[in-house]
Image (cartoon, rainbow, N blue to C red):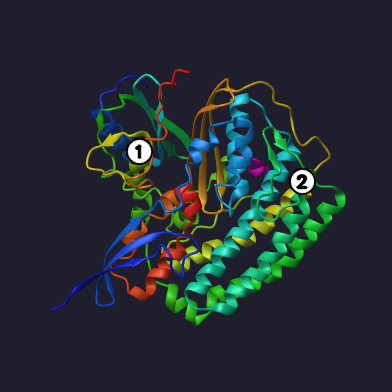
Amino acid sequence: MSRSTIIPFGPQHPAFLEPLNVSLKLDGETVTGAVLNLGYNHRGMEHALSLDYKKTQYLAERVCGICSNHHASAYCQAMESIYGVEIPERARLIRSIMMECQRLTSHLLALGHIAEAVGYENLFMQCFRERELVMRLVNEISGNRVHYSINVIGGVKRDLDASMEKRAAEAMTKLRPKLDELRGIFARDSTLSKRTKGVGKLTETQARDWCTVGPVARASGIWEDVREDSFAAYGMLHLRPVVRAEGDCYARTMVRMDECLRSVDLIEECLSLLREGPVAVDVKGHPTGEGLGRVEAPRGELVYYVKAVGKLQLDRIKIRTPAFVNVPPVQVLLPGCQLADVAVITVSLDPCICCTDR
Amino acid sequence: MSGGVEDRGVRGMAGGMKGRGARLISVIGRDRGDGTIELVYLFDEGGAMVDRRFVVPAEQEIDSISDIYAGAANMERENIDLLGMRFKGLEPGLLLVDKSVKAPLRKRPKEEE
């Protein structure tokens, strides 16, 4: 006779970077049920963000430490649509450069995290070593490693001079072979393959039903990338979304790995398109109206809805983060798997609880 | 499309959007300050953002669309926690616990000085 056991997985667990809890029902080593519990990191950000629209950009950047620049970009985009302003081409290109740099740092963190979850410590360290190259580049460009603080409503507040453009191009040249090497390891290492291939398979139908976005959706065969909708400078660039059909942990890992290489391409293309010009336009007066900002953050589509009523205080600001829709499918991925695979499957969704709980 | 649409329309709308292949982006609740809530169902349809709006009394129980879009459950539960709304078959407690401030995004009349 088999006996069911219920165990908590998290909120404090060595495999998780942030607090989330999955209540697991087990029959021996096999998971038979999973319930996701959120809210450990809820900070009331939407309320705080609505208090003073002039300070919102600063605070929006602090919703999450991994995709901070995307939060600020989406907020600025929403406000720019309310003001009805078009930001200069050079500002659009700089925003795209910074967003792709942040995609690199986020994906390399996620790749290192999955390596750690399967017990491959050396690979974890290699991912973080290559990531440091990009961290130093963004620090040189913006003066900050995590919260770039480079966006303002109407453009960007820091420009790239010629020497900075050259250093950024050199950094990409240096990074590309390192990423190629990493890709070879992720694609061919037998331990990684055994732990990720065929594990945690999210079908295309499930991915659509759970409204997933970003690498999670693209790894399940869904051709969807907000960058195709031409925000920032993406309309000027040659974007090639990475889409795979397998839907398992391996596919989600390889989508992120290949997107790192595409990000290098996009940064190089942006640098080649930079021309002299202004990097911001002025906006005046308190805004009135509704605006939507939508960017492709590293984890997928990030949406800001803003309702402004001609005062400092916003009537409503709503953030739909990618992790908010990408994490819940863990409840359909875990039943049937082995307990040892729970960490790998959960981490393969790249859960960000700062974004999910806000 | 806003303006007192009966809640039966929410499910019909969601079913229709799903049939057209639209992806649900978010269910945005906004307190209008007059005892009603505006619910904005935001979709992605072929890359374009499409919204469907409903204005409902704040205390009215709304049909859930979580059986049409599984991903809608947490979006609706978030509105339960933050705006004090009610959705059929869904429980509060996604982001807030019992001891938390109730419905923190609901507008309250200013206290007289």
Task: Determine if the magenta segment contains residue A231.
Answer: yes
Q: Quadrant of residue B62?
A: top left
Residue A223 makes an appearance in the image: no
Inspect the magenta stretch and tell me whether residue A284 lies in it. Answer: no
Query: Of all residues shown, which one is farthest toward the right?
Result: A163
Question: In the displayed structure, would residue A118 be above or below residue A75?
Answer: below
Residue at position x 73%, y 37% from top?
A89
Task: Return the x and y of residue A332 as percentages of the image width and height.
Answer: 31, 60
Most prominent secondary structure in the magenta stretch?
Answer: loop
Q: Is residue B95 above or below residue B86?
A: below
| Residue position for label 2 | A273
User: What's under tag 2, amino acid-wise?
Assistant: Leu
Amino acid type, callout 1 = Arg
* Badge 1 density bin: few <14, some 14–19, many ≥20, Cα 10 Å: few
Q: Position of residue A343 (x, y in %)?
A: 42, 69
Q: Please give the chain letter of the residue carrying mark 1.
A: B
Which stretch is magenta? A230-237
- Whole-angstrom CA distance, mark 1 to mark 2, is 38 Å
- The residue furthest front is B113
Q: Residue at x 63, y 25 (%)?
A: A84
Q: Under tag 2, what secondary structure?
A: helix
Q: Is residue A131 left or right of residue A255?
A: right
Q: Of A160 and A236, which appears nearest the observer?
A: A160
Do marks 1 and 2 share a subunit?
A: no
Identify the chain of the residue marked 2, using the numbered disc in the image.
A
Say which of B99 and A198 sits in front: B99
The numbered disc on residue B20 is 1
Considering the image in quadrants, where does the N terminus of chain B appear?
top left
Seen from the viewer's position, the closer of residues B27 and A286 is A286
